[in-house]
Image (cartoon, rainbow, N blue to C red):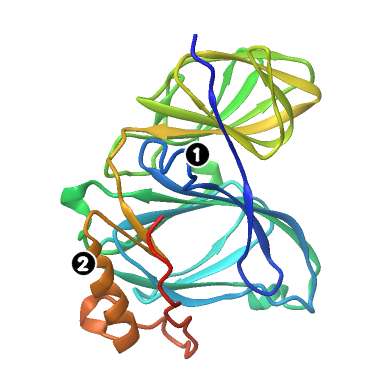
Amino acid sequence: MSAPLLLTAHTKDLGGGFMVRRLLPAGQRQAVGPFVFFDHMGPVTVTPADNHDVRPHPHIGLATLTYLFEGVILHRDNLGYTQRIEPGAINWMTAGSGIVHSERKPESERNSTYVNHGLQLWLALPQAEQEVKASFTHTPAHAIPEVRDGVARVRVLVGQALGAESPVATLSPTLYLDVQLPAGSEWTLRMLAEEQAVYVVQGEVHIDTQALAPHTMAVLADAAVLTAGPEGARLVVIGGQPLGRRFIWWNFVSTSRERIEQAARDWTAGDASAGMGQVPGETERIPLPEPKGNA
């Protein structure tokens, strides 16, 4: 049985003091299956004085997947979609040839204090689908299947596992599970995907005999026995078919460095014909950063 590869988070400020833990891409590993980016945001208490809004910005060549445990975020994009992102739902945005979106505090919560806590992931698209037409899909929490597998309560967020299938459509084989384990319990996680990793969101977990600290990702090569700590544990499983190395710069993902350079020029020029339009009703935009190389 092979020991898992452990990835630890590094902290990023998304603006306004809104800190996230980033697990992918990592120096030891760019991707797990199609997942090339993994951010754990919060839990953070949002007050009326806080401004964590993410202004309009572009993406190409990827899909974003947002999943909240607590809180609310308002998604708006240049396709005209406006969607409250709430706990338990899956919000899947395919950037493909280009999309622009913002993520803000809803007006109804401007004077409220609440907790935001969730995961935002990016997935590479198959090479033949990198320039697919942009789209956005919201799958409400009640439509996500939940199953019992021994002691584990498992929500099948994306893909097929344990006899259940998520309604979320993907462009390549993808696995994403939300798993809750009771205190002191043991659960055998089989290899459910070609590549697979576990991330501990809350609580303590041992993988076989190895302690896995909170906010650590373990990339697995074999089935593993997970043991929850005395307060139980919540974890996610990600994985799927690997899609090969990608160039990643800022919000752009591609098999072609030249395509990323073109997207950067399009955003600077405000080229709506290249899928770099504006979110209706918004005038702000995040400027292109200074190049720092590819991840």
Instruction: State the residue position of label 2.
Output: 258
Quick one: label 1, few (<14), some, or many (20+) residues within 10 Å? some
Horizontal relation, residue 41 to residue 279: left or right: right
Image: 289 above or below 68:
below
Quick one: label 2, few (<14), some, or many (20+) residues within 10 Å? few
Q: Secondary structure at mark 1?
A: loop
In front of the other: 170 or 15: 15
Which residue sits furthest top? 1
Q: Secondary structure at mark 2?
A: helix
In front of the other: 73 or 138: 73
* Residue 269 seen in this snapshot: yes
State which quadrant residue 288 falls in. bottom left
Task: Name the residue type under label 1.
Answer: Ile
Give the residue drawn at x 27%, y 61%. Answer: 96
What is the count of numbered marks? 2
State which quadrant residue 111 falls in. bottom right
Residue 260: % across, % down:
28, 67
State which quadrant residue 227 falls in. top right
Give the residue drawn at x 42%, y 81%. Answer: 279
In the rendered image, which quarter contains the C terminus?
A: bottom left
Residue 273's disc is: none
Q: CA distance from mark 2 to mark 1?
A: 38 Å
Instruction: State the residue position of label 1.
Output: 144
